[in-house]
Each structure stands twice: as C-alpha cells, then as structure tokens.
Amino acid sequence: MSRIESVDLNLLAPLHALLEERHVSRAAERLHMSQPAMSRALQRLRATLGDELLVRGPGGYQLTPRAERIQAELRHTLPRLEHLFAGEAFDPATAARSFRLAGTDYTVSVLSGALLARVFEQSPGSTVLFSRWHHAVFSDAEHGMVDLLVHGGSAPPPLRSQVLFEEDYACLVAGHHPLAGSSAVSLRDYLECAHIVVDVADGQQGHVDRTLALLGSPRRASVTVPYHAAAAAAVAGTSLVATLPRSFALQHMSPGTTVIPAPRDIGPMTYAMTWHPRLDNDTAQRWLRDTITATLAAATGPHAA
C-alpha cells in the first residue's frame, strides 16, 4: 500500500490552518471546529508526519523546520487540489474544444446551418466534426469514439437520449409517376411501387422499414443508396419512390419531381440526441446539448423542439 493511501486527507485543512495561524484556538475558529477537535487533529498530524510541527516558544508557538518546509509546499499544492476538485468551468468564448457528432445526412442538414452559426458565434475556437452514420455507431458512443449522436428512433442502454423533434414522412416521385398528384397514398399502392431505399444500416431505412416489417408489409428495394440526398437526386425521370422526411423531400424537389404524402401507416419519426452517461456533467458537452436544444427551439416549422 502506498503512503498516500494511509494518510487521512481530511487532515490537510487543519494542517494548513495550524501552520498559518500557529495557534490551536485560532486555527479551530478559522475552520469552525471546536478547540478539542483541532487539538486531536494536531496530535494525529504529529503522529502521521513524525514531527512536532508546532513547538511552544517565548512568543508563542513556532514552526519546526519540517513544518516550514510543509507550509511552503502547501502554498503550491492546495490551490492545485482546490482546482482539481472544483467544478470544471467551460467558457465557450475562449474554449478550443472538438465536438464529435454522428448522424445521417438528413440530421446533419437539419442541424448544420443554424447550429454551426450559433456554435461559432459563441465559441469561435471550437471545432465540430460530423461523421457518417453506420451500423455500429451506438457502440462508438459507448466506447468514446463519438460524443453525440443525432438520429431517429431509440438508442440502446446505457446511452442517454433527449427527444429533439418529430418529423412526418413524404414520398418524392417523378412528375410522370402514376401516384403524382395524389392527396393520399394507400399502403397497398405504395408497396406496388419501385422503391429507392436509403441504407441507414444493414440495407434498411430505419423507421420506415421497421414499421413496414411490423405491419407484415415489407417493401422491395429496387435501388439502395447511402444518403438521403442521393435518393432525392435519383428520382427524376424514373418510376422510383423515395420515402424521405417531409421537410427534406420538399427542400430537394427539383424540376420534374413532386412530393406526395407517404402512407399514414408509416407514421412520424421521433428524432433525438444521444450520449454516454459519462458525459452527463461534462460542462462543454452540456453546453453543446443546450446549444442544439436552443437552436431547434428558435427554429420555425417542423423542427421546433
């Protein structure tokens, strides 16, 4: 067992007070202790350090040579210990932190413009690193490879999540598609279409394909692409149906394409941000999460938190 493990660190404050005050009663008063309690602390310190520390002299107590050396050390050590155990401060204006986020291209598109403007306005020295979504991204968060995930659906334990917003789905189709102009699309008509699927993980598009599977009505993927933007770009001039978050579909309409409702059976998707519990009280990470929440709250339309 090391020496430090055998020392009662609660004696540090009495030691410092005794050496500064050179008087048991004044040291006790300084720490709001009783005089007998401070006397007992002095006895324990003498036993632990193997030195008298305070010896009575003509003008009162004097420090021993060992006590003088300890006092000099404490002037440097105590402020460092106080800093170590104090709550960590985070000043975004002077910070230079790297924040590692992961999400699909859709969630990045929702956050990036307004969020980055707010982040760099408040913390110009910081860096935001977006990485792509993949099947093991929740494991990455557990192992500290990414700080924050922004995604649809739920996260596995022990990760923590906070709901950000809810988004309906819509279908982006070519203007000549048989369903173009429909005000409502039945699940049966939808399933008979040729689909372009965004491969979020394992060849499936998260909420859309999970919901269809639960309904016992999986769709057939005629084409798979890695990004929502790629799905939107591939629709024009084809018979493909791209099922996308409604706001994303509307933003990516191009000449020759149109947006129609997705079957009501698919329902909306809830989006959240997720992090590991070890980051609960990290001041920089809390600032980032609060900034994301504030950014979405300030937005208008479907992304208001």
Image: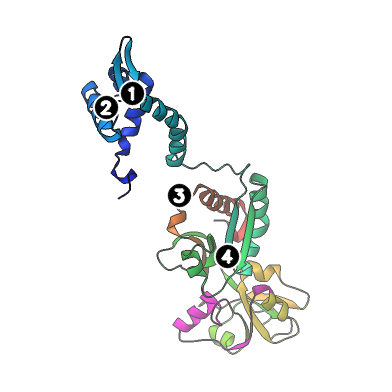
Tag 4 and tag 1, C-beta contact below 8 Å: no
- Please give the range of residues in magenta: 200-229
Q: Residue at x 47, y 83 (%)?
A: 213
10 Å neighbourhood of mark 1: few (<14), some, or many (≥20)?
A: many
Question: Which residue is farthest front?
Answer: 65
Instruction: Identify the amino acid type marked 2.
Output: Leu
Distance of mark 3 from mark 2, alpha carbons? 37 Å
Disc nearest the viewer among 1 and 3: 1
Residue on which disc 3 sits: 281
Q: In this view, does 113 lie above or below 13?
A: below
User: Which numbered disc, 3 or 4, marks the residue that appears first in the sequence?
Assistant: 4
Q: Which colour scheme is used?
A: rainbow
- The x, y position of residue 215, in whole percent, is 45, 83
Say whether residue 152 is left or right of residue 252. Answer: left
Residue on which disc 2 sits: 42
Q: Nearer the viewer, residue 24 or 134?
A: 24
Distance of mark 4 from mark 2, alpha carbons? 56 Å
User: Which numbered disc, 2 or 1, marks the residue that appears first in the sequence?
Assistant: 1
Q: Is residue 6 above or below residue 145?
A: above
> Which element is circle 2 on?
helix
Instruction: Identify the amino acid type marked 1.
Output: Leu
Q: Which mark is residue 176?
A: none
Residue on which disc 1 sits: 18
